[in-house]
Image: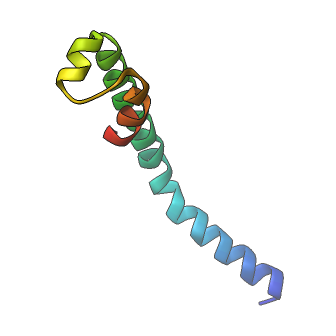
Amino acid sequence: MTYFAHHRSQTALVLDGMHDLLPSAVFAALRSWNDARITRNALHALSDRELSDIGLERSEIDAVARNHS
């Protein structure tokens, strides 16, 4: 087997293995994005007083939403 044929077959094996992971990775990324979006919207709906009651400031909402998902 030539060098190029060998590497092409190895690449095909790697891509075949990733084929099964790709849909689940995309789904996980979409779910994470949606969880962060829901958290961000819920926190933005709170008043400054309510945010203070749970120990947050409005400027921290994006960081909390990113870390939550």
User: Looking at the picture, how far across and down is residue 59, in whole percent?
Assistant: 43, 25
Residue in view at x 42 percent, y 39 percent: 27
> Is residue 64 found left or right of 15 in the rendered image?
left
For the N terminus, the image quarter is bottom right
Quarter of the figure with residue 11: bottom right
In front of the other: 52 or 16: 52
Residue occupying the far bottom of the picture: 1
Residue in view at x 17 percent, y 22 percent: 53
> Considering only vertical position in the picture, is 17 above or below 24?
below
In front of the other: 30 or 63: 63
Residue occupying the far left of the picture: 53
In front of the other: 31 or 59: 59
**How many numbered discs, if any?**
0
Residue in view at x 34 percent, y 30 percent: 35
User: Looking at the picture, how far across and down is residue 48, in whole percent?
Assistant: 29, 13
User: Looking at the picture, how far across and down is residue 25, in whole percent?
Assistant: 45, 48
> Considering only vertical position in the picture, is 2 above or below 38?
below
> Considering only vertical position in the picture, is 44 above or below 60?
above
Residue in view at x 65 percent, y 77 percent: 10
